[in-house]
Image (tube, rainbow, N blue to C red):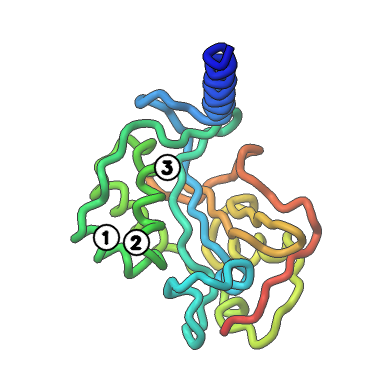
Amino acid sequence: MKRIYVSVAILACVSVVIAVEASKRRRTHTNPDAKFDYYVLALSWAPNYCAGHPKDQSNECRIGQQANFVLHGLWPQASEGDQPAACAPAQPVSHELVRHMLEYFPSRGLIQHEWQQHGVCSGLSAADYFGKVEQAVNGLKIPDQYRNLGQGQKFNVKDVERSFAQANNAPADAFRVSCHSGEMVNLQACLSKDLQYRACTISAQECPAPQVLMRATR
C-alpha cells in the first residue's frame, strides 16, 4: 500500500513539473533559431530598483553613486506574440568580457543573466552581442532633467517618453516607460537590428498609469 502511495505522489510531482514547463514554453520561444524583429534597450531607474531591493550591494545601489538610469539589457523583441527568451544553451560569458561590460552593467550576475536569457536569442556570439549592447547604450542620450533628482517626483509617462525621443532625434513612439505600483521600472528604447531608433510595437510593455514616481538619486 505504501508503494502505491509513493508512486501516486511521484506521478503528481512529475505532472506539476510538466505543467510548469509547458507553461514556460507557451510564454517564450525555445527554438534555437528563434526569430525577432527588433531590439529593446532597457534602462532601470536605479533609485526605484534599490528602494525595492535594500540588500542589493551592486554599484547602482551604493550611497553616493548618484545612479539614475542604469543599463538593464538589450532584448531581441518580436513585434507581437511570444517573446524570445533562453533560445539556446548558453556558455558563461568570459571573465575578460565580463570585466569590460562592468563599465555598463551594475553586476556580474546581471551580465550572465542577460546573455543567458536574451543574448543567445540574437544569433550573435557573446562578444558581438555585448558589442551591440555597448553601441546601443553609448548612443543613448539621457535628458538633463533626469540626471540628478534631488527629490522624488512624479512625471507624466508621455512627457518622459517624449523628452527621450526629442533628446535622441528619434520617432515619437520609439520610447516606452514600464512601471509597477505607480513607480517607474524601465525606460525602453526600440531599435532596429542595426540600432536605429524605430517605433515600438504593442509587444513593448508600456505603463498603464498616466504618471510614475521617480525616486531621488542618492
Q: CA distance from mark 1 to mark 3?
A: 16 Å
Image location (x, y in percent) of residue 212: 74, 65
Q: Which residue is mark 1?
A: 98
Per the image, label 1 sits on a secondary structure element best described as helix
Q: Where in the figure is residue 162, as x and y percent of width and height?
A: 66, 62
Depth check: 214 or 210 in front? 214
User: Disc 3 marks which residue?
Assistant: 117
Amino acid on which the number 3 mark rests in the picture? Gln
Q: Secondary structure at mark 2?
A: helix
- Decide if residue 23 is in sight here: yes
Is the Cβ of the residue at disc 1 closer than 8 Å to that at disc 3? no
Where is 156 relative to 206, above or below? below
Badge 3: residue crowd in 10 Å (few <14, some 14–19, many ≥20): some
Q: Are marks 2 and 1 in contact (CB under 8 Å)?
A: yes
State which quarter of the image contains the N terminus.
top right
Which residue is depicted at the point 56% across and 33% down?
79
**Which is more N-terminal, label 2 or label 3?**
2
Residue 13 lies, in percent from the top left, at 55, 24
Rendered image: mark on residue 108? 2
Residue in the image at 59% along x and 64% along y: 164
| Label 2: few (<14), some (14–19) or many (≥20) C-alpha neighbours in 10 Å | some
Is residue 107 or residue 182 the one in the foreground? 107
Instruction: Work out how far the residue at label 2 is from the one at label 1, CA to CA, in angstroms.
Output: 6 Å
Question: Callout 1, which amino acid?
Answer: Val
